Structures are given as C-alpha cells and as structure tokens.
Image (cartoon, grey):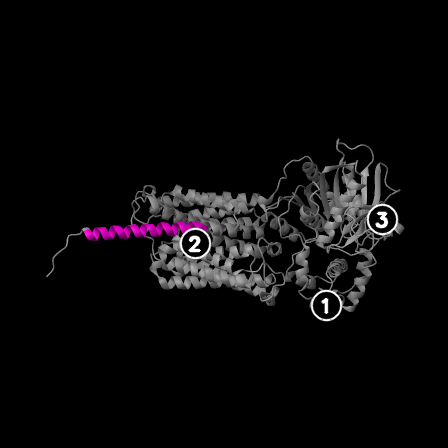
C-alpha cells in the first residue's frame, strides 16, 4: 500500500511538473538526449535478456545500442519534416512509421517499468502500466520541466547502474562473468549480426533522435556513450549477481525483488516510475508531433510547423501504448516488428528524398538562364 | 503544446484528481490472491505426529521380485497387498511398480493406492489424483505406503492432511513413496526427472492396478513441499514422458523451488545456526541425490565437513527426524565455508522453472512459511506466467508450511473439481 501511494505521488508530481513547471529553452541538453536514447538501450538489453544474456551478449547489446543512437542522432532530419502540408504516399508512410517506432519504444519502456515495479511491490502490472501511461501523456502534453526531469533521470540511471554493479560484486560472483555457472544458449555470430542490424535500423527510424540530433552532434555522441555505458554496467551488475548469465523471464531475477526491504522496494519503484514516465512521455510527445506533421488538420489552431496536435491525440497515443503493453509482446517480437517498421520507414524516406531531388532538378532546369558577362 | 495559463491550471486540477484516483486504484488492486485470511491453528497442525518421527520398515513387501526382466514397461505393477488397518470405508493397497531413474535406468518404486469403497459418483469411475508427499526422509522406510494410518509414521501426515480429503471427495489417490523410500534404490530428492518418473509411473501403475475403478480421462497431480517440486516436475515432463495421461491440472502446495544463483549459496551460508538442522537435512538430501544421479560431477566433501559427511550418511538410513538430529549443532560444523558454485549447474537442471507448463497450474503458498520461503514461489508464479503458463496463485497470509494443507484444502478441492468438470482455469497472471 505504501508503494502504491508512493507511485501515485511520483506519477502525479511528474505530471504536475510537466504542466506547471519551468518553460524549457530551445537548446537540447545531454540529459534530454539521454532520455530520448534510453529506450534503445532498454530495447537492446531486453532482447538480449529474452534470448539469454551473458557477458558477450551484454557487449553486443551495448555496442548495438550505441550504434543505433549514433545513426539516429547523426543521420539528420527526414525530408518529410520540412513542411506542414499533408503528405500522401511515401512521405505519409515515412511519418506513420516514425510515429509507430516512437510509440513502440515508449511501450517497451512501460513494459520494462511495469514488470520491475510489480516485481518489487506486488502492485498489478497492468494497473501500474496504465498509471505510468497517464502520467506520460500529461508529461507529453505539458512539455515543461523537461530539462530538470531529464537531468534527474540521468543521475538516477548512473547511480542505479553503479549501485547494481556494487551489489553484483558484493552479493554475487564476479568470476561467473567469464564462466557462467548457469549457462544460457550460446550467442551465434549470425544472430548477433542480425540483432545489431535490427537495433540500428530502429535507431535510424527513431524520430526523437532524428529531430534533435542535428542540433548538437557532440551531445549525441556523449549521450550514445552514456546510454551504452549505463546499460552495460547495469547488465554487468545483474550478471554478477546471478552467476554470469540469465534468461528472461527468470525465477532467479524475479526472486530478488521479493526479498528487498520495503523501503528499498519503494525507492526503486518510485525511481523506475520517474524514469519510465519521462522517457515514455518523450516518446508519446514525439509520436504526437509526427501525427501533427502527417495531418496538419489535427494541430491546435495556434500551432505552427513542428508543433503539437490536440489533446485527444495524445490521449489516443497513450491508449495505443497501454494496449501494446497489455498485449505483452516479447522483446524479441518487438525488435522484429520495430525493425520491420524501420526498414519500411527508411525505404519511404529514401523515396521521398529521391522524388524531391528530381523535382529540384526539374525546377532548376526550368529556371530562365540569366546571361552573365 | 503551449497551453494557456488558465488551461494549464485546469489540466493540473484534472491531473491531481486523476492522480488521487489512480493511487487509490493502485492501492485497491495490490496483488492479494488470498481466498481466506483465517489460518488453521499452527499449534494443532505443526506436530511431530504429522512429521513422521516413527520409521516403519515395510518388511518383505519392499523386496522386488527376483529375476525382473530389464524391459519392463514403466508403470507395470509388480506386486501389491492391501493394508489391513485402513479406516472403515477406505480401501488401501501398497504397490510396487516399474519406473526409471533420471538417467533412464529401470528400477522399482513403491506407492500407496487409496480409494473409497462403494461405487464411484460418475459412470466412468473415479478421477485419479497423484499425490506427491512432502519431505519425510530420503531412505527406505520413510515413504507414505509403509504405515499411512499409524500416527507418527512418515505416511500419516500425508494421509491425514492430504489424501483423506481427496478420497472423501470421491477421488482415487495414488501416492508414490519416491525412489529409494520404499524399495532401496537411487535417491531422487529434488531430482526433476527422477521424481517426475516416480509420479507419472505411479499413475500408470494405478490404472493397471484398478482398471475398472478409474476414469482414465481425468487425472491431476498435487504435491506439497518436496512433493510440490515433484508434482511440477511431473507436469514438466509429462507431455514427453507420459503423453497418454489425461492430466487436467497440477497443484504445487508450497512447492520446494529454489533459484539456482550464487545468492542461493550465500543464503545457505548465511542462514542462522539455530533451527538449521532440518534445513541442513533438506540440503544434504538434495546434494546426495544429485551426486548419486550424476556420478563424478560432485565431490560431497567440498560441501560437507567430516562431521557433515557423517550426518549425511545418517540421512541414508534414517528418516527426516533422525537426519535432523544428526545435523544438530552450529551450521559451520557441517557445511564447508566455501561451497563450490558448481552446484548451481545441477540446481539448474533440477528445477522446473524454464518452460511453459502444458496444464493449468495452482500454486498455494502460506506467507508465514519458514520451510519454503514464500517469495520464491511468488516469483515462480510470476515467472511461469511470463513464460505463458496458465497459473493461479493463492497466498495465505497467516499460514505456515503445514497449516497451509488445512487452510488451502477447500480451495484446492474446488480447483480440482473445476478442472475435472472441464471449466476453464481462472488465472491471476494478469495481476502478477
């Protein structure tokens, strides 16, 4: 009950901060980029854990996540983001896929968070995910305090990773990292490559990074390294704790939270909720942004280019995220689905770019030639 | 989305109200799969007479027939005899049946078969329930079939706390003794495949022993403590090992499930010295059985001190009470300070925790249980759900290991009756 209250307070507080907090300036901080990029880290680690994670898998997951963030952040804005007219055909498809990828990554964060919180608290996972989604929608709508909340998320993630590594070293068996006592299926080269390519394709189609990446390439690189490092250290701690390898869903993983002291469980649940709301809220915000781009008619009357749609759109997007969470797809399935969307997204983007360059060539060819002396 | 100040304030008010409502919803829906809050009085159920302080050797019955053919089909009934001291209205027999060890070696195991006298309620006979009993020892003479109706015997607890209720509800029951606990053989305490074979072959034997009595289209497996592990192991193995059995559901009552992780070793090392004798007895049974089933993989002296090895040997001939007495004293006298982590690989092979179950699963767990730690079974239920199993978890906040059998029995019987009636299982996986 205490954790329920704590979770409710955190969710409400984050939502209120987003509605009533300070207005953000336009520059994008590393912490914000970290928040945008974090779902890729969670996705990468989640997939590896689903198939059976060991030290080698952890390295592949960290490198894949970093590559995905770099590709997404450094690829530049998609051409479909350049104007506000309705976009038929390939351009519309590009926007829909981008929005869907964003929602999928938001759902992954909520799946991760609701599993973790319910494991620590006995709260119903489905109710937890609804509460987090509601707060995430408020975060997406409010749009304030993003810098402060993102900074908090970054600090929490770093401290959490270091703490977990410490617990792993003290209570687990660090020697098991090189020779797991309870082995998982070995990692094949083909599977590792396919997985890494899948994650990178998802990153390439992840709109949050595509939008803010061009504003600071240096920050993108720092955020990519941070996500990879935080994820790797976190997984390393868990691996040490559980004998060098584990496969989700795992009794071994689920057993530990049950024995955490209530105060520890409460703090962990609250912090996970904070991270999930901010990260999923960012994903919903981005998806809403793309809905606005695809259908300018759904924008609020005072909006301009790259602005946001009406409130009910955010609510609908939140509902979509909750629906995905309640369907409980496995990480493997989600990686496959999002990678497929990523491929379609890139093909559509390529087609739009190609047709625009043809149009530009035609326009320049039709321009009257001015004689110069 | 830039909202007007007035709109922002209104949205904040709505957020506050929604936040309060959702906090209440979170609080109200806290996982509470407890059908009842009232426990059986612990002082009345946690008695030595139920724990089996009397070791009863079964005499010549437990000597298998000579010159057994090596290719006996698992479940073949080799010997049987009625129990003369069965209560009025109860027909009970002990049987010897063919089975095989975890390694596939043919051997002979004993079981108790119990049924109410008189006609069955249904036209097709009585549904069969395989009962797997909790820890009573790991040696010959420690089973349930030797003297189930004698107070203080190793079988009395299982008869009075589990089997009698099932038989009274119209079910036929077969309760394996497990390998080496009636007929001398390979011990298989917490050995997944060995226990699974014991249980599944006892069901085959029951159908052959009382063909006209039983409805072969309806069966279930239940087990308490070690038996919970055995029941779940049987459920794990049945689709491959005994696909012909029509199992409608499997119930683990405080099943002995432990996570194979370094933490388990630290848990053993850090367990308090006082009252560790039974705990050490359980551990010695498991390690001894895993060692016997995996020759060359474990060096017992790496786990036990010389004094511990001597106590372990006691466990090879005496039942739980005698084993616990041999392990009385400071834990460090019996357990080596650095337990090798190689034990974890064997633990991994012997806990049915990695795959989806083919049948509906009921897990009952007392939250005051100190023999089987409740959290692991809550985690087990959650994990099984995530693996796609159809799981119902019932927790009993005030119950200890033994009282669960009383408090949980009405719910257990309801659950079994529903499975036999073909009703869909009501899983609470959504809330886990």
Q: Position of residue A4 (x, y in %)?
A: 55, 48
**B12 and A115: which one is in front?**
A115
Please report, as a chain letter, where disc 2 is located: A
Question: Residue reaching furthest top?
Answer: B123
* Closer to the eye: label 3 or 2: 2
- Counting other residues with Cα less than 10 Å from the Cα at mark 2, is it few (<14), some (14-19), or many (20 or more)? many
Residue ID for mark 2? A202
- Can you tell which quarter of the image residue A309 is in? top left
In this rendering, the answer to whether B163 lies above or below B143 is above
- Residue at mark 3 to residue at mark 2: CA–CA distance: 65 Å
Residue ID for mark 3? B146
* Closer to the eye: label 1 or 2: 2
Please indicate, yes or no, whether residue B400 appears anywhere in the rendered image: no
- Same-chain status of marks 1 and 2: no
Asked if marks 3 and 2 touch (Cβ < 8 Å), the reply is no
- Tell me which label, 1 or 3, sits earlier in the chain: 3
Is A71 on the left-hand or right-hand side of A59?
Answer: left
Label 3 residue SS: loop
Please report, as a chain letter, where disc 3 is located: B
Q: Position of residue A276 (x, y in %)?
A: 48, 52
Residue ID for mark 1? B302
Label 2 residue SS: helix
- Same-chain status of marks 3 and 2: no
Magenta part of the chain: A338-365
């Amino acid at each position: 009950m205490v954790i329920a209250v704590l979770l409710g307070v955190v969710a409400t507080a984050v939502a209120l901060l987003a509605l009533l907090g300070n207005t953000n300036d336009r520059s994008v901080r590393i912490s914000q980029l970290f928040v945008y990029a974090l779902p890729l880290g969670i996705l990468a680690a989640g997939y590896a854990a689903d198939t059976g994670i060991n030290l080698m898998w952890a390295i592949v997951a960290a490198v894949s996540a970093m590559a995905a963030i770099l590709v997404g952040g450094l690829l530049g804005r998609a051409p479909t983001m350049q104007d506000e007219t309705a976009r038929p055909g390939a351009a519309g498809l590009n926007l829909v896929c981008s929005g869907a990828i964003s929602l999928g990554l938001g759902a992954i964060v909520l799946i991760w968070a609701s599993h973790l919180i319910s494991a620590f608290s006995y709260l119903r996972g489905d109710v937890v995910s609804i509460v987090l989604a509601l707060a995430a929608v408020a975060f997406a709508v409010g749009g304030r305090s993003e810098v402060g909340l993102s900074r908090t998320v970054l600090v929490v993630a770093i401290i959490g990773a270091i703490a977990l590594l410490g617990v792993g070293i003290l209570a687990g068996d660090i020697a098991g990292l090189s020779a797991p006592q309870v082995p998982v299926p070995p990692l094949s080269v083909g599977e590792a490559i396919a997985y890494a390519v899948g994650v990178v394709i998802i990153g390439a189609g992840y709109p949050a990074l595509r939008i803010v990446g061009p504003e600071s390439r240096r920050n993108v690189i720092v955020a990519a390294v941070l996500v990879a490092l935080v994820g790797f250290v976190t997984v390393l701690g868990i691996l040490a704790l559980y004998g060098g390898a584990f496969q989700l869903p795992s009794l071994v993983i689920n057993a530990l939270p049950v024995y955490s002291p209530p105060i520890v469980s409460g703090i962990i649940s609250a912090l996970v909720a904070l991270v999930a709301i901010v990260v999923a809220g960012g994903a919903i915000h981005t998806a809403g942004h793309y809905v606005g781009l695809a259908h300018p008619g759904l924008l609020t009357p005072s909006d301009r280019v790259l602005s946001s749609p009406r409130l009910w759109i955010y609510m609908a997007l939140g509902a979509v995220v909750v629906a995905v969470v309640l369907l409980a797809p496995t990480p493997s399935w989600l990686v496959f689905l999002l990678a497929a969307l990523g491929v379609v997204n890139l093909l559509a983007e390529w087609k739009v770019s190609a047709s625009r360059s043809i149009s530009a060539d035609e326009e320049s060819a039709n321009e009257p030639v001015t004689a110069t002396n | 989305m830039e909202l007007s100040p007035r709109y922002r304030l209104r949205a904040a008010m709505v957020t506050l109200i929604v936040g309060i409502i959702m906090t209440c919803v979170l609080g109200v829906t806290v996982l509470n799969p407890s059908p009842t809050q009232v426990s059986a009085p612990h002082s009345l159920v946690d008695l030595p007479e139920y724990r089996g302080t009397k070791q009863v050797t079964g005499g010549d019955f437990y000597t298998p027939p000579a010159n057994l053919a090596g290719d006996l089909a698992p479940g073949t009934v080799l010997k049987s005899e009625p129990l003369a001291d069965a209560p009025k209205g109860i027909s009970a027999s002990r049987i010897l049946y063919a089975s095989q060890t975890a390694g596939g070696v043919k051997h002979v195991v004993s079981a108790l078969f119990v049924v109410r006298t008189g006609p069955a309620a249904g036209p097709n006979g009585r549904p069969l329930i395989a009962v797997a009993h909790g820890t009573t020892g790991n040696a010959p003479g420690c089973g349930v079939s030797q003297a189930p109706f004698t107070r203080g015997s190793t079988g009395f607890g299982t008869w009075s706390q589990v089997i009698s209720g099932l038989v009274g509800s119209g079910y036929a029951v077969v309760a394996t003794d497990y390998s080496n606990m009636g007929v001398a053989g390979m011990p298989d305490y917490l050995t997944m495949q060995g226990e699974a074979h014991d249980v599944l072959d006892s069901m085959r034997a029951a159908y052959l022993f009382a063909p006209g009595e039983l409805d072969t289209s309806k069966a279930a497996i239940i087990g308490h403590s070690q038996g919970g592990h055995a029941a779940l192991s049987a459920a794990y193995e049945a689709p491959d090992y005994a696909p012909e059995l029509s199992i409608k559901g499997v119930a683990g009552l405080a099943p002995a499930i432990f996570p194979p992780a370094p933490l388990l070793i630290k848990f053993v090392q850090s367990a308090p010295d006082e009252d560790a004798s039974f705990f050490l007895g359980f551990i010695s049974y498991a390690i001894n059985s895993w060692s016997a089933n995996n020759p060359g993989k474990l060096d017992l002296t790496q786990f036990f001190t010389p004094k511990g090895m001597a106590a372990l040997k006691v466990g090879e001939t005496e039942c739980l009470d005698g084993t616990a007495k041999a392990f009385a004293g400071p834990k460090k006298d019996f357990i080596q300070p650095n337990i090798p982590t190689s034990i974890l690989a064997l633990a991994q092979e012997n806990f049915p925790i990695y795959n989806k179950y083919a049948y509906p699963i009921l897990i009952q767990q007392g939250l005051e249980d100190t023999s089987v730690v409740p959290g692991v079974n809550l985690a087990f239920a959650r994990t099984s759900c995530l693996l796609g199993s159809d799981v119902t978890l019932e927790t009993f906040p005030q119950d200890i290991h033994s009282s669960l059998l009383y408090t949980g029995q009405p719910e257990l019987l309801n659950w079994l009756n529903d499975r036999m009636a073909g009703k869909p299982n009501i899983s609470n996986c959504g809330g886990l």
